[in-house]
Structures are given as structure tokens and as C-alpha cells.
Amino acid sequence: MKYLGGIFLFVVLLIIDTKPTEAVCGYESCPETKPNMVNIHLVPHSHDDVGWLKTVDQYYYGHKNNIQHAGVQYIIDTVITELIKDPKRRFIQVETSFFAKWWEQQTETHKLVVKKLVNEGRLQFTNGAWSMNDEAAVNYQSVIDQFTVGLKFLDETFGICARPRVGWQIDPFGHSREQASLYAQMGYDGEFFSRMDHSDKFRRMVDLALEMVWDASESLSEVKLFTGLLYNHYWDTPGFCFDVHCNDDPIIDGDSYDNNVKSRVDDFIAFAAKVAANFRTTHIMIPMGGDFQYEDAEVNFKNMDKLIKYVNARQATGSHYNIFYSTPGCYLNSVHQGLQSYPNKTLDFFPYASDSNSFWTGYYTSRPTQKRFERDGNHMLQTAKQLSVFAGLSSEQQKEDLDYLRQIMGVMQHHDAITGTEKQAVSNDYDRLLYDGIIGGASNARDALRVLTNLPEGEFESCLQLNISECAFTKDSADNVVVTLFNPLAHTSSQYVRVPVKKESYQVTDEKGRVVASEVVPVAWQVLALEYRDNNTQHELVFKASVNKIASYFIKKVETRENKEIVLPKSDKKSVKETEKNLEVPKRFKKSYPALALQGSNKRIALLNDRAQGGTSMKDGQLELMLHRRLIRDDGYGVGEALNEQKYDKPLIARGKVYLILNSVEESTKVERLAEKEILLPFSVFFSKASSQSQTQSAIAKAVPSFDDFPPSVHLLTLEPFTDNEILLRVENFLDHIEGKVVSFNIRPIFDSLGGVEIRETTLDGNLPLSEMKRFKFHAEGSGAISTEAEYYTAAHKPLAADSSLEASEFSVTLHPMQIRTFIIKKK
Ligand SMILES: *[C@@H]1O[C@H](CO)[C@@H](O)[C@H](O)[C@H]1NC(C)=O
Ligand SMILES: *[C@@H]1O[C@H](CO)[C@@H](O)[C@H](O)[C@H]1NC(C)=O
Ligand SMILES: *[C@@H]1O[C@H](CO)[C@@H](O)[C@H](O)[C@H]1NC(C)=O
Ligand SMILES: [Zn+2]
């Protein structure tokens, strides 16, 4: 410990000693390479799962090492110590959630040291999202959010030098085109990953096609991203794992009988030659790391130092292998300067088959209730974000609660969380975290609704068990209950609202006191049969509500009409069920399309779901949806237990909704996309007591901006507090180039109603002014002549920048099909 202290003090003295210079981070800090040699970019990294066999905290603290020896805090501690020792050493930090936790516990002096490492490009953040997200079971909205959270932390902590330039999705089980598109829209230069269908990988090795240009969108131009597959998964070179977790030979270079420098260097160069034969430039990247490696980083760095020294020493005798510490960003920079052409890739990398009989598709369905709970978390997050903006919530507690939910949702996107590939105990921990997050979000929503409606003391209970028709708030009586509905979408929507009630007669009225048609319907017997359900109510009061942003409905008990169900004509009865009717209203991980469809020459039938599920069409005319997955044996891929969920000592029961849309081929996909928005972000329902109907009348106290004037294909993707005096706004044209067209509208009215004084446009993640975006352009084979100079993309349109003194015309926004634009609005 004394020893460490000495180093920090020494470095701090150095910082204080040197005159403040321009930070040399980014590509300027990349190591020198040699022409006419095979340049080996040695990339030290650690793959730190945000929960898998152990919980997030167990991994961070190195707790429960009997399950798996892993402690992320020690990894970061020792890596920093080792980086300080030699300016040539490099390390990439990937999972921002772990780094942020570590950062919080450092002293100011130590923070200065780390800042210096970041400013000199020695510690490079790569990927940089809160977690390394899955790409199949996630929704694009939550992926964008979790990058926003991670990159915002890095930007606020370090500034531009910490901004990641490349994606590093080395462990997720298959890859989506949409993820590549999001990287491009965030201004990333490229992405790397390591899992690809084994036969595809084999073919690509033969064709020198492990690196490619992903044409990531059919609708958006310039959404092309360099994408590279790692040669040997993300693990160390075989035989060269110098980590305390490994048993490979260290490099023994002293006067020892065991001196192995010659054979170690021979082996390494032989491996490098094999790798180099599969790539197009004179550069290769060799990752050095693996799961939770570098816990005692001195062991790794000491041996890598020697490896570098002895491989390069051979250059004196004619070897043309040049090796140095590097990063994925620096490797990509060299490749970019290599001016090669790369094959063009379209579509996804799904499904992932690791060998001929191992398709990693079961996880699309694993843990159905956790997959749904994650969507509930997103629903609450979007609701709390928007309501926080409208009500101007600003207390420390409110900000903390919102941040907590944002971060937990970031954790949930991790490739062992939303996927359901974690151990049961870890799954339970995710539930605990998400539940806490949702409770905080619900508390913000309540605080906001107390400001925004005329029920300053309203309870605004969100009943989280409505999926089994359970609500403590209405279980005894639904008399004099106000139902407040929040619509997270831009456009007015009509949806059915279901309130658990006792079988009595009720009258529902809207804010103007008008009676709204309603019906008491029995709850499905399958739900009533759940033994753990609180069986106080066996019915639901159903009514159709129409909401712009916020609306209240009032429920009152009335004299029973013989306590008998109201019999409605057949057609009406049908409308109460959630059938197509519900979806007619004109509202894929884009994005991956949430619909499974069969299409004939003029009709199309599509299934939409409320959570991630696997599905297929094995035979013509069949649709198959996997609803629930249970295994009686461990699958042999590391988790070490069978996926066989129990709840209340019984096999888990999951309840969900599948929507069926039948339509003409021309209209159908449009309708499906509208429905997808309503299914992902339905009304948020809040319950309060009111002494009388008059309380609901006159309803909303403070005006909430209306987004109804946006063109119908424009989705309010995000509206959230950004900094204390800034708001982030994302708008999306969700129809593609076949379904829709370019739309233009003016956001001045919204800007004004949000109290805006200035507005600027940013990259998709909200953290970089769009005017500053400059990212690598690579040449795709067959797309004309190769340029003789390195090429770049900058913003494809003039970034919007305006302040309140300017004409309304300066606030015009044009959205191409599928385009998303992100703005930061500064408030008074
Ligand atoms: C709940 O109550 C209903 C109506 O009395 C009954 O049919 C049902 O079996 C009960 N459920 C359980 C689990 O007891
Ligand atoms: C209902 O939703 C909760 C989360 O709010 C979840 O824990 C539970 O498993 C769900 N129940 C069913 C039957 O799907
Ligand atoms: C890539 O291939 C697709 C499909 O064949 C084609 O539409 C697109 O123009 C190609 N992109 C480039 C850059 O060559
Ligand atoms: Zn992993």
C-alpha cells in the first residue's frame, strides 16, 4: 500500500509540474506503426459481465468467489496502477456501470491520475454504454437510452477524451443490423464482435471477409459502419493467457534452465502469421484478455512487456513482425488509413450457431416474466421522464430516483440479463433492482401528477400487478376512484382501460362529466386459479379512454341493476376484448420487427407480442411463437444449472398478450408499426381517491404540451431531463421508405411550451454536438473507385441550432423515413 501511495504522489507531482497542454487523446495518441511490417495491435481488455453467475455487486466487490473468482474493483485498481508505470501501456474500459461505481469511491488525487491516463489515450473507453447489451431481446429505445446514460457519465466526468469511438460487442449472442445503425447514428467509427454463425465465419475467413461494411439501414443513407469479427473469439491467443486465472507459461527470460523466450516468441509469431493471412491490411488486432481478467494486472502487463520486447527484438534479424500496446480504436484508425475495400453486409447476424447443432435461439424466450418486467421498466422510465419534464421536478431525491431507474434499465439490457442466461439467484437480484427502480419512477410520476392535475394530494397508485388483475387500491371498493391516464406517445390514443373491481355496478365519467360506456367483465378462470393471487376481486371494469397526454376518469358505484352483468350486443362485447379492434387506431428492434407475419398476395396476418419471444414459420402457412421455455438439464454453456423457474414452489406461470393483425398487404406493416408503439408504451394508469366527481372535472391544472400536431408517423421517442437546465428531445419517423415519406414539421411550439431559450442538435446519444460529428467512411466493394485519401462522414443535414430570438422557420425539422433526430433544449 505504501508503494502504491508513492506512485500516485509521484504522478500527481508530474501533473502539477507539467504546463497544461492540449490533451492528446483519441487517434492522435495511437502508437506508431511500421510500414512493410505486420503490425500487431495488442489489446489488453477484461470482459466484465454486469451480472451472470454472480450478481452485479458480487462481481464488483469480488464477493462469493466460490461461485466464480471475479472482482471488478480490483481489476480497475490494478490496471490503473500498471498503466501509470509505463506510458506505452494501454487498456480499454468497456462497461461504464462498473467504472462509475469504482470512480465514486476514488479520492480526488487518484481521480486526477486517472484523468491524465484518459487524456493521454492510455485508458480508452470503448463501447462505453452502461452495459454490453444484447441485440435480439432488447428494444431499440432502451439501447439508445443505455448508451445515453453511459456516454453522458463519461462526458460529464472526463470530457471529449473519454468519448468511445468504437463499439465492442464481443460477447452478445448474435448481432443486429439495427445496433450497427445506432452506432453510426451515434458517430462511432466501427464495431467489433466475436460471435458469428460458425459456417458464415469459416466462409468469411476464406474470403478475407471477416471485416466488412455494414449497410445498416434500407431507408437511411450514410448509415454504414465498419464491422470486424475477432479472429479467435475475444480470448487471449491460445497459450498466451498471462492472467492469474490461467495456467499458460509465463515468459521466462532470465538465466534459467526454463528460459523459454525462443519458443514463446516462435509460437506467438506463428499465431500472428495465421491471423494476418485472414485480413486485408498489414494490421492485425490481438485481444489480450477474457472474462474478469486483470484482477492482478501486474502479472499480465509484466509478461506482455516481455512479449513485446522479444518479438520486436527479432526485427534486428529480419523479422517483419511489429508488436505494441494498442486499442480497438487505434487498430481501426490504422485500418482506415489502409484504404482497402471491404465486402458489403446487409441483414442481421441471427441466429447465432456456435456449431452445427447449437443454435442460440432458446434465449429469445427464456424467463418470460423477466422479459416482460423489463418492458414494464421501460414503460415506467419513459413515463417518469416525460412527467418529470412537464412538472419540472428538480429535487435531489427525484433526480436520484430517475437516474437509478435509468441505470437499472441499462443493467437490464446486459447480454446476461434481458436474455435470461443468468443464474436464478442473479435473476432474482435483477428483479429486486428493477423493482426498486420502478418504485422510484412511480414516486416521480406521482409527484409530477400532483403538480399537473388538480389532485394535489392524489395517491396516484400504480398497481404493478394488473397483469393478474390485482390492485390493492380498488380491491375493496372502486367507488369514487379517479383513474389518471398518461399517454407517453405523441398522438392522442384510444385504448381500453381495465380496473380490478368487485362485481357491482359502476358509472364512469370523463373530465367533462360525460358518462363513458363501461362494462364489468369476469376475469379469466386461468387467472382466478392462481393460488398466490389475492382473490378479493374476480372482475374488471372496462372502459375505452381517449387521451392526448393526461386525462382523468371518475368511477362511481351506482345502484345495482340486479348486480348482473350488462349484456351488450354481440358486436360490442367483442370490442371489449383486446382484439384487432384495439389496434385499428392510427398507433422491431426497428427495428428488429416485433411482428411475426405470414403474407399472401393480398392479405397479411401478423402477430405482435408484449415482450421478446422466439418465433418461426416452419411450414408454409404456419406461425409458431415460443411462449415459455423450461429446461430440465443445464445446457452445458456455463451457467451450471437448469432453466426451470419456480414461483411460490410451483412451476412459474407467465401471462402475456399476443396481438393479431389481419390486413391488406399494402396497409398492414404501417398498422403494425402503429400498434407496436401502443403495445410498447400504452397508457400508464394511476389510481387516486376523490371525494366527489367535481374533483376530476376541470382536470389538468397545468397545461401539458401537446405533440398532436406532429405528423402521424412521428414518434416522441424520448423526452427527458438532461442536465439541471436542459431537456433532451428525440423524434422519430417510424415508417420506412416504402410505408411512408419525408415529413416536415415545426418544433417551435413545443420549444416554447417547454420554456426553451436555446436548442442544439446532437448525435443520437445526446452527448456530442452533431456539428462536431466526424466518423470514418470505408469503401464497400463494388461501390465505385476507392479514394486515395481517408474519407469521413459528417452530419448528413445542417444540424439545427437556434435560440428563442430567431424566427419560427429556424425550428423546422425534416425527418426522412426511419430517421431519428436528437435535440438538447436549454431552459430559462
Ligand atoms: C377465487 O375466487 C373465485 C370465486 O369465488 C373462485 O372460483 C376461485 O377458485 C378462487 N381462486 C382460488 C385460487 O381460490
Ligand atoms: C405480473 O407482473 C409481475 C411484474 O410486475 C411479474 O413479476 C409476474 O410474474 C407477472 N405475472 C404473470 C402471471 O405473468
Ligand atoms: C450493399 O448491398 C445492398 C443489397 O444488395 C445494396 O442495396 C447496397 O447498395 C450495397 N451497398 C453498397 C455500399 O455497395
Ligand atoms: Zn459476457
Image (cartoon, helix red, strand yellow):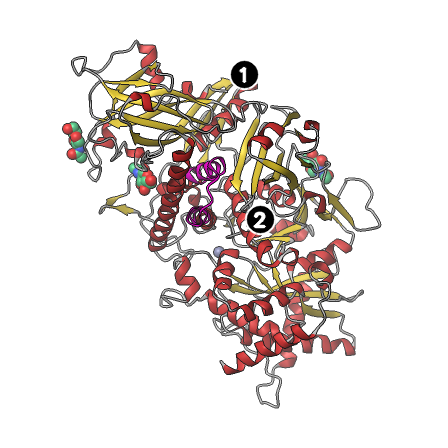
How far across and down, in percent of the image, does residue 337 sit? 77, 55
Furthest-right residue in view? Answer: 788
Crowding near the residue tagged with mark 2, few <14, some 14–19, many ≥20 C-alpha atoms within 10 Å: few
> What amino acid is at disc 2?
Ser
Is the residue 343 above or below the residue 24 in the image? above
Front-lying residue, 273 or 786: 786
3D distance between C-alphas at marks 1 and 2: 36 Å
Residue 780 seen by the camera: no
Residue at figure coordinates x 30%, y 19% from the top left: 508
Locate residue 171 relative to residue 41 in the image: left or right.
left
Which of the marked residues, 1 or 2, is nearer the chain's N terminus? 2
Identified at 58% across, 78% down, the residue is 9
- What element does badge 1 sit on? loop
- Can you give x and y, in whole percent of width and height, for residue 506 in the image? 25, 19
Pair 1/2: label in front? 1
Most foreground residue, 512 or 599: 512
Question: Can you tell which quarter of the image residue 505 is in?
Answer: top left
Quadrant in which the C terminus appears: top right
At which x and y percent is residue 468? Answer: 28, 34
Query: Residue 233 is drawn in which quadrant?
Result: bottom right
Q: Is residue 82 above or below residue 157?
A: below
Q: Please, what secondary structure does the residue beneath circle 2 have?
A: helix
Label annotation for residue 199: 2
Answer left or right for 603 relative to 643: right
Report the amino acid beneath label 1. Answer: Asn
122 w.r.t. 504: above or below: below
* Mark 2 vs ligand 3: CB below 8 Å: no
CB atoms of marks 1 and 2 within 8 Å: no
Instruction: Residue 602: give its label.
Output: 1
Residues in magenta, as a range: 379-405
